[in-house]
Amino acid sequence: MRARDILLALLIIAAGLAITAHHQGVFRDFAQAGRDVADTVAAVCGQFDGGEWRELERFSRQVPGAGATSLVIEDPNGQVTVIGQAQDDVKVEAVHYGMGTTDKAQRSRLETSRADGEVMIKVIGPQGRVFRRGSRFDLRVTAPADLDLTVTVASGPVHVRDMTKDVQVTGASGGISITGAARVKVVSASGDVELRAIRGPVEARVVSGSLTMEDVSGDVTASAISGDVRLRDLRAAVTASSVSGSLNLERFAGPQAALRSTSGDLDVTFAAPLTGRLAARTISGDVSVAVPKGSDCAVELQSVSGDIGIQLPLRETVHERGHVSGLLGAGRGRLELRSVSGSVEVKAAPEGAQVD
């Protein structure tokens, strides 16, 4: 693949970030991610100029962490792993790789510092520039688990485990996985995102890649432009959208959910009878919801040019062209499913599928 092809692809991703952010009213959140994508162009293109990565050096550093409240990591090119532990200091194990001219690669460096309550780990190039084409730092960081964590990468995966406070990750190219945190915010331009065992709210936005969440206790806001979204074992309110990809909400136990898809199917299962609110809408795709026995909600189903199917006995049923409504139980909650060009189906959940 030629470097100019990579450049064009990344610029398209950056444009998609800006357009989507403007549409959703969160331009400032995405603006920095767009700049990160633009910054990574030189580094990524350099990888296709020929040559192979070779190890230049390995070293470790330690920064006093007692009394600190936050940890900030900036690594434009390389893998970042952060592990929370019961310790006072922040320890960094780094592997520096080079490609092409060795002299240029060696002029990139890793800086560590402590200012007030913030510990900083930053990879920079000559004269303070962020990038040095042909240079890569892989970082493994162990830190006090109770630090707020912010990680910014341009090209490379990020893995975070066992942090107990807030975690924020911005990535341009590379997968992101976070297991264990109080609150999470993720922005990814290109790469799969996996979040598990989060005890507070989550905000995740992905441009190109799949998004998976499991075992989240706080409210969830999730969106993907090109990729599937799979949410499992969520226990609070959910707002999720996908432009091109399926959206699955499995074993949902929250009070309400709002799901939207432009081109993709929506599938929902519950961990308990539905007594809250679920609204699922898609333009080009099918909507399927498995409702447990004992659910109590008003039901409204609509499809402009697709079939409508319901396997449950409704009270006060109204059948019209492209529209079915009725009640399950007393109708305390609400189930609203809509598709423009696709089928809409409500079926009975299998016995034993829900959690007591």
Image (cartoon, rainbow, N blue to C red):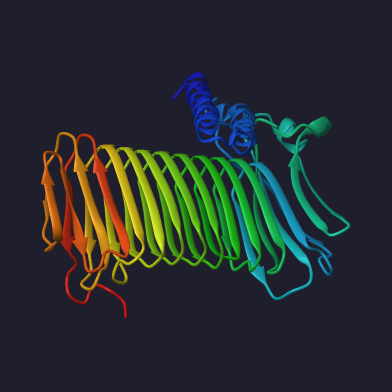
Figure check: 154 above or below 119: above
Residue at image coords 36%, 48%: 259
Residue at image coords 66%, 65%: 165
Q: How many marks?
A: 0
Residue at image coords 44%, 55%: 238
Residue 17 as seen in the image, left or right of residue 337: right
Q: Is residue 287 visible?
A: no
Residue 42 as seen in the image, left or right of residue 66: left
Hey, which quadrant is residue 313 in on the image? Answer: bottom left
**Looking at this rendering, what residue extends furthest in the right direction?**
116
Q: Please name whichever residue, 324 or 204, is drawn nearer the observer in this view of the structure.
A: 324
**Looking at this rendering, what residue extends furthest in the top direction?**
4
Q: Please name whichever residue, 56 or 32, is drawn nearer the observer in this view of the structure.
A: 32
Hey, which quadrant is residue 329 in on the image? Answer: bottom left
Figure check: 23 above or below 81: above
Q: Position of residue 30 (x, y in %)?
A: 59, 36
Q: Which quadrant would the N terminus be assigned to in this image?
A: top left
Q: Position of residue 131 (x, y in %)?
A: 70, 33
Figure check: 145 above or below 228: below
Q: Position of residue 257 (x, y in %)?
A: 39, 55
Q: Which quadrant would the C terminus be assigned to in this image?
A: bottom left
Hey, which quadrant is residue 244 in on the image? Answer: top left
**Looking at this rendering, what residue extends furthest in the front direction?**
316
Q: Is residue 44 visible?
A: yes
